[in-house]
Every structure is written in structure tokens, then in C-alpha cells.
């Protein structure tokens, strides 16, 4: 890339596959009388980039920064002013600088204005946060938190707005969110929108959220003579509370309380106890991980 010493024009020559096969391409579409300093360019890992230069039309207009984006597929884009003429001329003696990062963000900076109005100005290309997706399972689960991948942005941490069933429920700069009010049982739809410091946004795809926070019900009935060695019968009536997000009953577990091996069962069980006092503990767990425990005190007398 260069500026002609006599023509005061800006030329670029794209390097593709280690070759300048396209030759020199003129970048400044507007006729200029002066180019204040060498033009500057920046290129990202994608091959996209920009070219910038200082120029004046020579008709009393102040020296200004101008530039063009380079698209690796479409070539040079339209010429664009990078400074506001209302802020005064660019100080060509102070030079200017330009650079791009690896993800197509770019900045061109210069000193503009005079006296008390002298200031550092910047023309920037700030890409929106990258796309991302939610991680929270779509299976029926007891709700813990919403989780998603990070939106990539080299110029600052974005702010995430969490939406549930089409309405915002909170904001965070983390990649996980636990609503203070919780989320009710049922089937929901959620997504997250990332907003960068310039107000640019990108959103995650909408995902289903199936919530079951309600423990199952459980009733334990004991029949038989409560004497040592006699057979006791146990019946269990358990079920998951019916709601749109109900996961269904997973298992019933019985802990006898006398050191015997616990058992998993469905509706009934039998057991013989030696003489003594015991605490029978029966738990019912649903497929979402919710559970309820019922404890019964058993007094087993000696056998007659």
C-alpha cells in the first residue's frame, strides 16, 4: 500500500496466496490534493481488513481521515469518512495510527482540532458479540440455573439479558443466571441476548426448558404383627404431582433401619425385624431428582 508523491492517490495491492496477483488498486475515490502521511491498513485473521488515509480536497476543507473496508470476497467497499469535520482539522504533524485485531475489529486514531478543542479521536469498526448457544438441558429437571456459552468480544465483556417465555427476567455479565424468583414447573422457552458496550447485540437460539421442582407424594402403610421374626408387609403409594412439567416417578427406596441392605421397590415389600426399636425410612424420587422421605418408628416386641 502506498500514496503517490505526485498524484496524491492511495493504492493498495492485496496479498492473496503469497501473491500480489490483483496488482495495485486505487483506494481513494474522491479526488484529493494532499495526502498528509502514508496510508495505514489493518488485516484480521479472516483476511478482511481496511485501508485508511489523511486527505484534503484543497478547497478549504480541513484535513480529514477517510477509509475503506476490505472484504476478502467482495473486495474494497465504499469510501467512508472516519472523522467529523465539525471537530476541526486533523493535525497532520502529529501523525495517526490504525490497527485491526484478529476478529475484524479495527480502530483508526488521530489528533483533531486546535487549542482548547484539541482532542484524540477514533474511528472504529466494532463487530457485534459472536453467536453463542444455551447449555441448560432440555430434559425434565429440577431447576438449578440457566447456562450458556460466552459471546466472544475482544473489546469488553458483554451484558447478557435473559428472556423467559418472551419476557426479560434479568441481566448479568456471567454465563449463568439463577432468577431470584425461581422458575415455576412447566415447559418454558428461553434465550439470551448479548449486548456490547456500543449497544450491538447478538442472541442465542431459543431453547426449551422443562422444569419439575415438585417432590412426588408418598404414603407408607405397614401391616402385620410387630413381633420379632414375624413378617411385616409394607405398601407404598407414590406418584408425581401432575403438571405440564411432571417428570414421572423414578424409584422408591426402603432403608429398614436394622442394618439390612436397603431395597428398591415399586409398590410392596416384606421384612422381618428382630426385637428392638427401628426407624423405617422410605424415599420416593422422581425423574427430575426431586424426592420425599417418610419415616416410621417401629417397635418390635419379643416373639411369644
Image: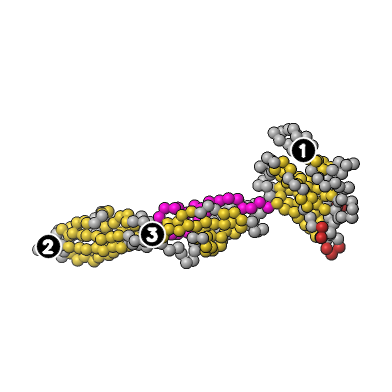
Q: Nearer the viewer, residue 283 or 247?
A: 247
Q: Which residues are magenta?
A: 126-149
- Report x, y in % for residue 20: 75, 34
Pointer 1 local density, CA inside 10 Å: few below 14, some 14–19, many at least 20: some
Nearest to the eye among marks 3 and 2: give it.
3
Q: Who comes first in sequence, dot 3 or dot 2?
A: 3
Residue at horizontal 79 percent and vertical 37 percent from the top = 24
Of 129 and 61, nearer the camera is 61
Which of 181 and 82 lies nearest the eye of the viewer?
Answer: 82
| The C terminus, quarter of image | bottom left
SS for dot 3 = loop
Residue at the spot of label 2: 303
Report the mark closest to the observer, 2 or 1: 1
Secondary structure under the numbered disc 2 in the rendered image:
loop
Mark carried by residue 13: 1
Tell me the distance, in whole angstroms, between the alpha carbons under discs 2 and 1.
102 Å
Name the image quarter holding residue 285.
Answer: bottom left
List the residue tagged with mark 3. Answer: 244
Q: How many marks?
A: 3
Q: Residues within 10 Å of mark 2 (few under 14, many from 20)?
A: few
Image spot of residue 130 (x, y percent): 60, 50
Is 178 on the left-hand or right-hand side of 110? left
Residue at figure coordinates x 26%, y 55% from the top left: 266
Within-10-Å neighbours for mark 3: few <14, some 14–19, many 20+: few
Q: Residue furthest left?
A: 304
Give percent across and percent down for residue 224: 15, 62
The answer to whether residue 173 is magenta is no
Q: Earlier in the sequence, mark 1 or mark 3?
A: 1
Residue 1 in view: no
Judged from the image, the secondary structure of the residue bearing numbered disc 1 is loop
What distance separates the C-alpha of mark 3 from that of mark 2?
A: 51 Å
Depth check, mark 1 against mark 3: the one in front is: 3
Amino acid at each position: 500500500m502506498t500514496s503517490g508523491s505526485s498524484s496524491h492517490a492511495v493504492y493498495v495491492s492485496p496479498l492473496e496466496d503469497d501473491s500480489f496477483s490483483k496488482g495495485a488498486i486505487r483506494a481513494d475515490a474522491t479526488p484529493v490534493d494532499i495526502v498528509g502521511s502514508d496510508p495505514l491498513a489493518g488485516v484480521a485473521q479472516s483476511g478482511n481488513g481496511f485501508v485508511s488515509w489523511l486527505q484534503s480536497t484543497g478547497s478549504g476543507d480541513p484535513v480529514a481521515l477517510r477509509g475503506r473496508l476490505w472484504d476478502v470476497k467482495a473486495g474494497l467497499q465504499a469510501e467512508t469518512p472516519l472523522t467529523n469535520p465539525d471537530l476541526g482539522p486533523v493535525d497532520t504533524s502529529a501523525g495517526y495510527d490504525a490497527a485491526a485485531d484478529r476478529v475484524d475489529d479495527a480502530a483508526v486514531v488521530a489528533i483533531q482540532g486546535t487549542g482548547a478543542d484539541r482532542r484524540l479521536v477514533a474511528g472504529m469498526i466494532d463487530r457485534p458479540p459472536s453467536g453463542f448457544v444455551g447449555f441448560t438441558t432440555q430434559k425434565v429437571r429440577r431447576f438449578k440455573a440457566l447456562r450458556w456459552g460466552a459471546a466472544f468480544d475482544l473489546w469488553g465483556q458483554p451484558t447478557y439479558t435473559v428472556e423467559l417465555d418472551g419476557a426479560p427476567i434479568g441481566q448479568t455479565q456471567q454465563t449463568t443466571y439463577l432468577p431470584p424468583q425461581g422458575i415455576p414447573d412447566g415447559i418454558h422457552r428461553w434465550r439470551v441476548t448479548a449486548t456490547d458496550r456500543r449497544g450491538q447485540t447478538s442472541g442465542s437460539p431459543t431453547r426449551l426448558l422443562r422444569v419439575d421442582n415438585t417432590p412426588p407424594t408418598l404414603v407408607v402403610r405397614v401391616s402385620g404383627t410387630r413381633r420379632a421374626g414375624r413378617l411385616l408387609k409394607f405398601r407404598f403409594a407414590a406418584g408425581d404431582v401432575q403438571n405440564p412439567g411432571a417428570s414421572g416417578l423414578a424409584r422408591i427406596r426402603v432403608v429398614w433401619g436394622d442394618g439390612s441392605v436397603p431395597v428398591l421397590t415399586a409398590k410392596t415389600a416384606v421384612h422381618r425385624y428382630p426385637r428392638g426399636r427401628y426407624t423405617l425410612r422410605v424415599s420416593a424420587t422422581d425423574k427430575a431428582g426431586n424426592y420425599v422421605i417418610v419415616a416410621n418408628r417401629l417397635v418390635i416386641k419379643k416373639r411369644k
